[in-house]
Image: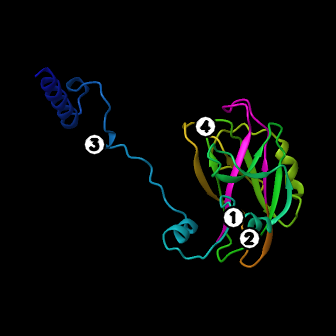
Amino acid sequence: LILSLVLVYCLVQEEKNLLSFHREDTLDVEQDFTANPDPTLRDPIYLSEDEEALYVRHDSNSKLIDFTDPSAEKEWNKHVVQNDGWTWFADNREKDKFGLIANNVTGGQHISLEVTGGKLGLVELSYVISYENFGVALSWVDDSRDGGTHRPKCKNEIWEREGLIRLGGVEYLFGSWDEKASVPMVTILKNRVEEGGKGYLHICLTPHSTHRQGNENKFKLLGVRLY
Protein backbone atom coordinates (compact mmCIF):
# COMPACT_ATOMS: atom_id res chain seq x y z
CA LEU A 1 0.00 0.00 0.00
CA ILE A 2 2.78 2.45 0.92
CA LEU A 3 4.62 1.71 -2.32
CA SER A 4 1.44 2.32 -4.29
CA LEU A 5 0.95 5.68 -2.58
CA VAL A 6 4.52 6.66 -3.33
CA LEU A 7 4.11 5.77 -7.01
CA VAL A 8 0.85 7.74 -7.24
CA TYR A 9 2.48 10.75 -5.58
CA CYS A 10 5.41 10.64 -8.02
CA LEU A 11 3.05 10.43 -11.00
CA VAL A 12 1.03 13.41 -9.76
CA GLN A 13 4.17 15.49 -9.29
CA GLU A 14 5.43 14.52 -12.72
CA GLU A 15 2.11 15.58 -14.22
CA LYS A 16 2.41 18.93 -12.46
CA ASN A 17 5.86 19.36 -13.89
CA LEU A 18 4.62 18.70 -17.41
CA LEU A 19 1.56 20.96 -17.15
CA SER A 20 3.01 23.89 -15.24
CA PHE A 21 5.95 26.13 -15.94
CA HIS A 22 5.95 27.83 -12.52
CA ARG A 23 8.78 26.56 -10.37
CA GLU A 24 6.75 26.92 -7.17
CA ASP A 25 4.20 24.38 -8.47
CA THR A 26 6.72 21.67 -9.23
CA LEU A 27 9.30 19.58 -7.55
CA ASP A 28 12.98 20.35 -8.12
CA VAL A 29 13.39 17.65 -10.74
CA GLU A 30 14.85 17.53 -14.22
CA GLN A 31 13.01 19.90 -16.56
CA ASP A 32 12.17 19.25 -20.21
CA PHE A 33 13.39 22.49 -21.77
CA THR A 34 11.86 21.59 -25.13
CA ALA A 35 8.38 21.83 -23.52
CA ASN A 36 8.82 25.43 -22.35
CA PRO A 37 6.74 28.21 -23.98
CA ASP A 38 10.01 29.37 -25.53
CA PRO A 39 11.60 25.93 -26.07
CA THR A 40 15.34 25.36 -25.91
CA LEU A 41 16.39 22.93 -28.63
CA ARG A 42 19.67 21.24 -29.44
CA ASP A 43 21.58 22.58 -32.39
CA PRO A 44 20.83 20.38 -35.42
CA ILE A 45 23.58 18.17 -36.80
CA TYR A 46 23.96 18.32 -40.56
CA LEU A 47 25.86 15.94 -42.80
CA SER A 48 28.37 17.52 -45.13
CA GLU A 49 27.94 16.91 -48.87
CA ASP A 50 30.77 14.38 -48.71
CA GLU A 51 29.21 12.53 -45.75
CA GLU A 52 25.79 12.45 -47.42
CA ALA A 53 27.33 11.03 -50.60
CA LEU A 54 29.15 8.33 -48.65
CA TYR A 55 26.69 7.32 -45.97
CA VAL A 56 23.26 8.15 -47.43
CA ARG A 57 23.50 7.86 -51.20
CA HIS A 58 26.40 5.36 -51.23
CA ASP A 59 27.71 7.09 -54.34
CA SER A 60 31.23 5.73 -54.23
CA ASN A 61 33.03 2.44 -54.26
CA SER A 62 35.85 2.30 -51.76
CA LYS A 63 39.19 0.66 -51.15
CA LEU A 64 39.81 -0.60 -47.62
CA ILE A 65 43.18 -1.08 -45.95
CA ASP A 66 42.09 -3.25 -43.03
CA PHE A 67 44.33 -3.69 -39.98
CA THR A 68 41.68 -5.62 -38.01
CA ASP A 69 41.63 -8.72 -40.23
CA PRO A 70 44.06 -11.39 -38.93
CA SER A 71 44.45 -12.79 -42.46
CA ALA A 72 45.07 -9.46 -44.22
CA GLU A 73 48.63 -8.65 -43.10
CA LYS A 74 50.20 -9.41 -46.47
CA GLU A 75 47.63 -7.26 -48.25
CA TRP A 76 47.94 -4.09 -46.15
CA ASN A 77 51.71 -4.46 -45.88
CA LYS A 78 51.90 -3.67 -49.60
CA HIS A 79 50.92 -0.08 -48.78
CA VAL A 80 53.54 0.49 -46.07
CA VAL A 81 56.56 2.39 -47.39
CA GLN A 82 58.02 3.45 -44.05
CA ASN A 83 57.40 2.26 -40.49
CA ASP A 84 59.12 3.61 -37.42
CA GLY A 85 57.63 2.21 -34.23
CA TRP A 86 54.20 0.84 -35.22
CA THR A 87 53.41 -2.82 -34.51
CA TRP A 88 50.52 -4.97 -35.73
CA PHE A 89 49.01 -7.17 -33.01
CA ALA A 90 45.89 -7.89 -30.92
CA ASP A 91 46.09 -6.02 -27.63
CA ASN A 92 43.05 -7.50 -25.85
CA ARG A 93 42.95 -10.48 -23.49
CA GLU A 94 41.30 -12.75 -26.07
CA LYS A 95 43.92 -11.78 -28.68
CA ASP A 96 41.36 -11.22 -31.41
CA LYS A 97 41.14 -7.42 -31.77
CA PHE A 98 43.96 -6.57 -34.15
CA GLY A 99 45.22 -3.15 -35.08
CA LEU A 100 48.32 -1.21 -35.99
CA ILE A 101 49.57 0.18 -32.67
CA ALA A 102 52.14 2.70 -31.47
CA ASN A 103 52.75 3.04 -27.74
CA ASN A 104 55.55 5.27 -26.49
CA VAL A 105 55.49 8.20 -24.06
CA THR A 106 58.16 10.12 -25.98
CA GLY A 107 56.15 10.09 -29.23
CA GLY A 108 57.51 10.45 -32.74
CA GLN A 109 56.50 6.97 -34.01
CA HIS A 110 55.65 7.40 -37.70
CA ILE A 111 54.17 5.29 -40.47
CA SER A 112 53.75 6.14 -44.14
CA LEU A 113 51.26 4.40 -46.45
CA GLU A 114 51.10 4.73 -50.23
CA VAL A 115 47.48 5.27 -51.24
CA THR A 116 45.53 5.76 -54.47
CA GLY A 117 42.65 8.22 -54.58
CA GLY A 118 39.09 7.03 -55.12
CA LYS A 119 36.25 8.66 -57.04
CA LEU A 120 35.68 11.39 -54.42
CA GLY A 121 39.30 11.70 -53.34
CA LEU A 122 38.38 11.16 -49.68
CA VAL A 123 40.55 9.49 -47.04
CA GLU A 124 38.80 7.99 -44.01
CA LEU A 125 40.69 6.80 -40.92
CA SER A 126 39.26 4.50 -38.26
CA TYR A 127 40.91 4.14 -34.87
CA VAL A 128 40.16 3.40 -31.22
CA ILE A 129 39.30 6.03 -28.64
CA SER A 130 39.45 5.18 -24.94
CA TYR A 131 39.39 6.88 -21.55
CA GLU A 132 42.80 5.74 -20.35
CA ASN A 133 46.33 5.26 -21.71
CA PHE A 134 45.52 6.61 -25.18
CA GLY A 135 47.12 9.65 -26.78
CA VAL A 136 46.99 11.88 -29.84
CA ALA A 137 48.20 11.17 -33.37
CA LEU A 138 48.77 13.53 -36.28
CA SER A 139 47.87 12.76 -39.88
CA TRP A 140 48.52 14.37 -43.25
CA VAL A 141 48.87 13.50 -46.92
CA ASP A 142 51.73 14.64 -49.16
CA ASP A 143 54.04 13.44 -51.93
CA SER A 144 57.00 12.49 -49.69
CA ARG A 145 57.68 9.01 -48.37
CA ASP A 146 59.26 10.21 -45.12
CA GLY A 147 56.72 12.83 -44.03
CA GLY A 148 58.50 15.93 -45.27
CA THR A 149 58.35 19.15 -43.29
CA HIS A 150 55.47 18.04 -41.08
CA ARG A 151 57.26 15.16 -39.42
CA PRO A 152 59.07 17.22 -36.72
CA LYS A 153 55.61 18.17 -35.39
CA CYS A 154 55.27 14.56 -34.19
CA LYS A 155 57.57 15.41 -31.27
CA ASN A 156 55.38 18.28 -30.03
CA GLU A 157 53.13 17.61 -27.05
CA ILE A 158 49.43 18.26 -27.74
CA TRP A 159 47.54 20.01 -24.94
CA GLU A 160 44.10 20.10 -26.53
CA ARG A 161 41.81 17.35 -25.26
CA GLU A 162 39.39 17.02 -28.16
CA GLY A 163 37.94 18.68 -31.23
CA LEU A 164 38.29 18.84 -35.00
CA ILE A 165 41.65 20.53 -35.35
CA ARG A 166 43.61 21.04 -38.55
CA LEU A 167 46.69 23.24 -38.56
CA GLY A 168 48.81 23.81 -41.63
CA GLY A 169 47.55 20.69 -43.39
CA VAL A 170 48.05 18.45 -40.32
CA GLU A 171 45.01 16.92 -38.62
CA TYR A 172 44.77 15.92 -34.96
CA LEU A 173 43.38 12.48 -34.13
CA PHE A 174 42.35 12.30 -30.48
CA GLY A 175 42.55 8.76 -29.11
CA SER A 176 41.27 9.71 -25.66
CA TRP A 177 37.93 10.87 -24.29
CA ASP A 178 36.17 11.10 -20.92
CA GLU A 179 33.69 8.24 -21.30
CA LYS A 180 34.74 4.99 -19.61
CA ALA A 181 34.54 2.94 -22.77
CA SER A 182 36.75 1.96 -25.70
CA VAL A 183 35.04 2.36 -29.07
CA PRO A 184 35.94 2.83 -32.75
CA MET A 185 36.09 6.36 -34.16
CA VAL A 186 35.91 7.32 -37.84
CA THR A 187 37.31 10.57 -39.26
CA ILE A 188 37.24 11.82 -42.85
CA LEU A 189 40.39 13.84 -43.41
CA LYS A 190 40.35 17.26 -45.04
CA ASN A 191 43.42 16.12 -46.97
CA ARG A 192 42.43 14.53 -50.28
CA VAL A 193 44.00 12.33 -52.91
CA GLU A 194 42.75 12.95 -56.43
CA GLU A 195 40.99 10.09 -58.20
CA GLY A 196 43.61 7.70 -59.53
CA GLY A 197 46.41 9.81 -58.08
CA LYS A 198 49.10 8.57 -55.72
CA GLY A 199 49.90 10.04 -52.35
CA TYR A 200 51.49 9.17 -49.03
CA LEU A 201 49.31 9.04 -45.94
CA HIS A 202 51.27 9.74 -42.76
CA ILE A 203 50.24 8.99 -39.18
CA CYS A 204 52.48 9.70 -36.20
CA LEU A 205 52.14 9.52 -32.43
CA THR A 206 52.74 12.66 -30.35
CA PRO A 207 54.31 12.64 -26.86
CA HIS A 208 52.37 11.71 -23.74
CA SER A 209 50.61 14.60 -22.01
CA THR A 210 50.21 14.60 -18.23
CA HIS A 211 46.62 15.87 -18.36
CA ARG A 212 45.44 12.64 -20.01
CA GLN A 213 44.40 9.57 -18.02
CA GLY A 214 46.97 6.80 -17.59
CA ASN A 215 50.72 6.48 -17.87
CA GLU A 216 50.82 4.90 -21.32
CA ASN A 217 50.58 6.69 -24.66
CA LYS A 218 48.89 4.42 -27.18
CA PHE A 219 47.25 4.92 -30.54
CA LYS A 220 45.50 2.04 -32.31
CA LEU A 221 44.76 2.39 -36.01
CA LEU A 222 42.01 0.09 -37.34
CA GLY A 223 41.90 0.91 -41.02
CA VAL A 224 42.04 3.34 -43.92
CA ARG A 225 39.27 3.65 -46.48
CA LEU A 226 39.63 5.54 -49.76
CA TYR A 227 36.51 6.79 -51.50
At horizontal 26% and vertical 42% (from top left) the residue drawn is: 37
- Looking at the image, is mark 2 or mark 4 earlier in the sequence? 4
Q: CA distance from mark 1 to mark 2?
A: 27 Å
Query: Is 49 in front, or is 62?
Result: 62
The residue that disc 1 covers is 71
What is the secondary structure assignment of the residue under circle 2? loop
Q: Nearer the viewer, mark 2 or mark 3?
A: 2
Q: Nearer the viewer, mark 3 or mark 1?
A: 1
Say which quadrant the N terminus sits in: top left
Q: Which mark is residue 193?
A: 2
Q: CA distance from mark 3 to mark 4?
A: 34 Å
Q: CA distance from mark 3 to mark 1?
A: 53 Å
Query: Is 157 in front, or is 166?
Result: 157
Magenta region: 202-227
Label 3 crowd (10 A; few <14 / some 14-19 / many >=20): few
Q: Nearer the viewer, mark 1 or mark 4?
A: 1
What is the secondary structure assignment of the residue under circle 4? loop
State yes or no: discs 3 and 1 in contact (Cβ < 8 Å).
no
- Looking at the image, is mark 3 or mark 1 earlier in the sequence? 3
**Is 50 on the left or on the right of 160, as rendered?**
left
Q: Check disc 2 and give the amino acid type.
A: Val
Q: Check disc 4 and give the amino acid type.
A: Tyr
The residue that disc 3 covers is 35
What is the secondary structure assignment of the residue under circle 3? helix
Q: Nearer the viewer, mark 3 or mark 4?
A: 4
Say which quadrant the C terminus sits in: bottom right
Q: Check disc 3 and give the amino acid type.
A: Ala
Label 2 crowd (10 A; few <14 / some 14-19 / many >=20): many
State yes or no: discs 2 and 3 in contact (Cβ < 8 Å).
no
Residue 203 in the image: x percent, y percent? 77, 54
